[in-house]
Image (cartoon, rainbow, N blue to C red):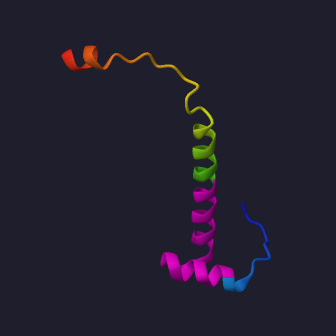
């Protein structure tokens, strides 16, 4: 998808230097992927302690 964005040059330049990514497009793609991953991890953390898996470690070890 093509779109026009107004991004702070310093921010993009810093991101390119830190990540060693050559193009602005790839920096934006990487940033979006990281943001999505971060949010999905937050969603998983909401389930902590709410799912009872009833795992019997001794039975699993005997297999």
Most common secondary structure along the magenta stretch: helix
Residue 21 appears in the picture as rendered: no
Percent x, y of residue 23: 57, 77
Percent x, y of residue 22: 52, 79
Quadrant in which the C terminus appears: top left
At horizontal 67% and vertical 80% (from top left) the residue drawn is 11
Quick check: 28 left or right of 4?
A: left
Residues in magenta, as a range: 11-35
Question: Relative to 10, does residue 37 appear above or below in the rendering?
Answer: above
Residue 5 falls in which quadrant of the image? Answer: bottom right
At horizontal 74% and vertical 65% (from top left) the residue drawn is 2
Quadrant in which the N terminus appears: bottom right
Percent x, y of residue 38: 59, 52
Find the residue positioned furthest to the left: 62
Q: Nearer the viewer, residue 49 or 40?
A: 49
Residue 62 falls in which quadrant of the image? Answer: top left
Percent x, y of residue 21: 51, 76
Residue 16 appears in the picture as rendered: yes
Q: Nearer the viewer, residue 63 or 34?
A: 63
Quick check: 3 left or right of 28?
A: right
Residue 27 inside the magenta-drawn segment? yes
At horizontal 30% and vertical 20% (from top left) the residue drawn is 57
């Amino acid at each position: 998808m093509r779109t026009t964005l107004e991004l702070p040059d310093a921010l993009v330049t810093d991101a390119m230097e830190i990540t060693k990514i050559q193009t602005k497009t790839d920096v934006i793609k990487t940033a979006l992927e990281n943001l999505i991953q971060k949010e999905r991890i937050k969603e998983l953390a909401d389930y902590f302690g709410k799912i009872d898996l009833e795992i019997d470690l001794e039975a699993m070890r005997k297999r």
